[in-house]
Image (cartoon, rainbow, N blue to C red):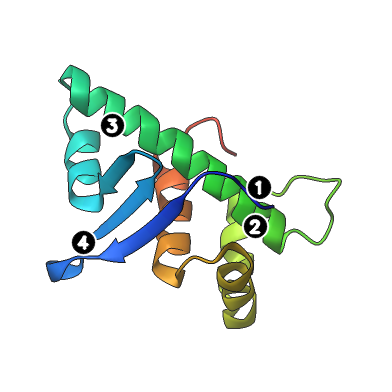
Amino acid sequence: MASTKAFSLSMKRGGNMQFTDGTWTFDTEEIEAAVKNPQREGDERDMLNAFARYAYYRYKQIRDCVNPRKCKYMWIDKVREQLKSPAKLRRVCNLLNITEDEVLYIVAFVKKHLKYVK
């Protein structure tokens, strides 16, 4: 599951997270504001679309880490159920080199905002 893309996450003051995907830097506060705004400007729309692609890419990696049957896709509720186990959550974090906060934020964002994920 190695990738040539550079991903990182950092915490800012106040509990906001920042995700970095190559040249894009996403702030969770800006993402939440963009999601709530139905009248998005061009830059805001581009940022949200880029984050949605990033979130879906990371979600697929997370799903593949907790899926015991690689030939059958898991539904998102089953992925969330698997991540309730601290051992499985740590395993995902270790395999993907990401934090627990990032895993949980990505899965929550995908469940809430990406309608094509079941």
Q: Is residue 70 left or right of residue 3?
A: right
Q: Which residue is mark 2?
A: 78
Amino acid type at image mark 3:
Met
Q: Which mark is residue 47?
A: 3
**Front one among 109 and 93:** 93
Element type where label 2 sits in the image: helix
Which of the 4 image quadrants contains residue 51? top left
Name the mark nearer the viewer: 4 or 2: 4
The CA span between labels 4 and 1 is 28 Å
Q: Residue at x 70, y 54 (%)?
A: 64
Q: Which residue is mark 1?
A: 75
Q: Is residue 89 left or right of residue 54?
A: right
The percent coordinates of residue 96 (x first, y second) are 59, 62
The CA span between labels 4 and 2 is 27 Å
Q: Residue at x 20, y 18 (%)?
A: 42
The percent coordinates of residue 58 (x first, y second) are 54, 48
**CB contact under 8 Å: marks 4 and 2:** no
The CA span between labels 3 and 4 is 17 Å
Q: Is residue 116 left or right of residue 8?
A: right
The CA span between labels 3 and 2 is 29 Å
Q: Which residue is mark 4?
A: 16
Amino acid type at image mark 4:
Asn
Q: Residue at x 25, y 42 (%)?
A: 31
**CB contact under 8 Å: marks 2 and 1:** yes
The CA span between labels 1 and 3 is 27 Å
**Front one among 64 and 2:** 2
**CB contact under 8 Å: marks 1 and 3:** no
Query: Mark 4 or mark 1: which comes first in sequence?
Result: 4
Name the mark nearer the viewer: 3 or 2: 3
The CA span between labels 2 and 1 is 5 Å
